[in-house]
Amino acid sequence: MTPAPGDRTASRETARTTDDASGEAARVVVVHDRAEIEAWARARGAAVREVDEDWESITYEAEAVDPAGVRTRCRYRYPIPRAAALRRLARTYVVGMVHDVGRARCHHVRRVIPVGTTEAELRRNAVLVASALIDLQRHGRCGASVVTLTPYTVVSALEWEG
């Protein structure tokens, strides 16, 4: 892979080819800090976005197409410091939701970190955040929407037995 002008990350890149959900092959570049992914994206005119988050890490990604037409993704996984990760875990809820698809039932489970001051408010906000995520992520595939989803469990991640 030829580095773009001003790209200082080429010496630390680890590349591999993967298939994404669309079936297209993409080259994946893994970098080791936030400055590297920002430099990579800036050199290619790409935007950095958050693609995954849980209580212990956040994964950032930028995507660009090189002059040869090869799609390349640059990823950086930020491991959250242990003390902060444990605080995030304590604020995480597991939300199980279900909706009907024809004669079948479709189940979705999401881990979310809601904002609120009381337990009831946290649980309600966890359902709202989870239903919005499911709608965004799965509506096209199974028809899940905020209106059709019904929660069947909302529990603190510390109490989850799944």
Image (cartoon, rainbow, N blue to C red):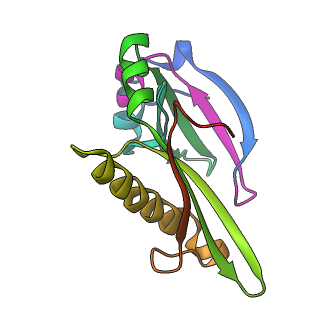
Q: In the figure, is residue 120 to the left or right of 137?
A: left
Q: Looking at the image, which residue is at 59% across and 29% down?
A: 29
Q: In the figure, is residue 44 to the left or right of 141?
A: left
Q: Nearer the viewer, residue 22 or 129?
A: 129
How many marks can you see?
0
In the rendered image of this protein, does residue 109 appear above or below residue 158?
below
- Residue 70 x, y percent position in the rendering: 64, 47
Outermost residue toward the left in this view: 117
- Residue 16 x, y percent position in the rendering: 72, 30
Q: Looking at the image, which residue is at 62% across and 47% down?
A: 68
> The N terminus is located in which quarter?
top right
The answer to if 11 sits in the magenta stretch is: no
**Magenta-colored span:** 21-38
Outermost residue toward the bottom in this view: 102
Q: Looking at the image, which residue is at 48% across and 66% down?
A: 136
Q: Is residue 5 visible?
A: no
Q: Looking at the image, which residue is at 24% across and 46% down?
A: 116
